[in-house]
Structures are given as C-alpha cells and as structure tokens.
C-alpha cells in the first residue's frame, strides 16, 4: 500500500472514530489541495 492522501485520510478518520484525541501522521501535500 502506498503512502498517499487517501490512505492517510482513511487511517486518520478511523482513529478519530475510535475516540483518539490526537492523530499524528505524515505530511501529505496532496491532501491540502482538497
């Protein structure tokens, strides 16, 4: 699995839905364009 904006947005959303207060991820420049 490649590290792209879609992968990190899904992983971050899952962590937030599980109750995470903070989610630390890599910087993905493509996500800023959305």
Image (cartoon, rainbow, N blue to C red):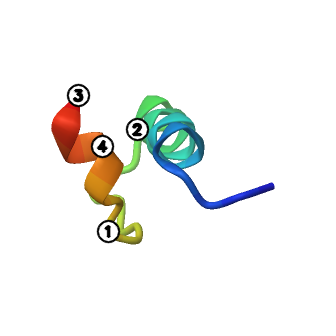
Which mark lies nearer to you, 4 or 2? 4
SS at badge 2:
helix
Q: CA distance from mark 4 to mark 1?
A: 9 Å
Q: Earlier in the sequence, mark 4 or mark 2?
A: 2
**On residue 34, which mark appears?**
3
The reply to whether discs 1 and 2 touch (Cβ–Cβ < 8 Å) is no
Q: Which mark is residue 16?
A: 2
When the figure is inspected, residue 1 is found, relative to residue 24, above or below; the finding is above
Q: Counting residues from the N terminus, which is met first, the one under dot 3 or under dot 2?
A: 2
Q: Identify the image quadrant of the N terminus.
A: bottom right
Are the two marked residues, 4 and 3, in contact with CB atoms closer than 8 angstroms? yes
- Mark closer to the observer (3, 1): 3
Residue at the spot of label 1 = 27
Q: CA distance from mark 3 to mark 2?
A: 19 Å
Measuring from the top left, give residue 23's x and y in whole percent.
35, 59
Return the disc, 1 or 2, that comes first in the chain's sequence. Answer: 2
């Amino acid at each position: 699995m490649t590290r792209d904006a879609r992968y990190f947005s899904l992983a971050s959303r899952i962590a937030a839905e599980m109750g995470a207060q903070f989610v630390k991820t890599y910087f993905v420049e493509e996500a800023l364009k959305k």
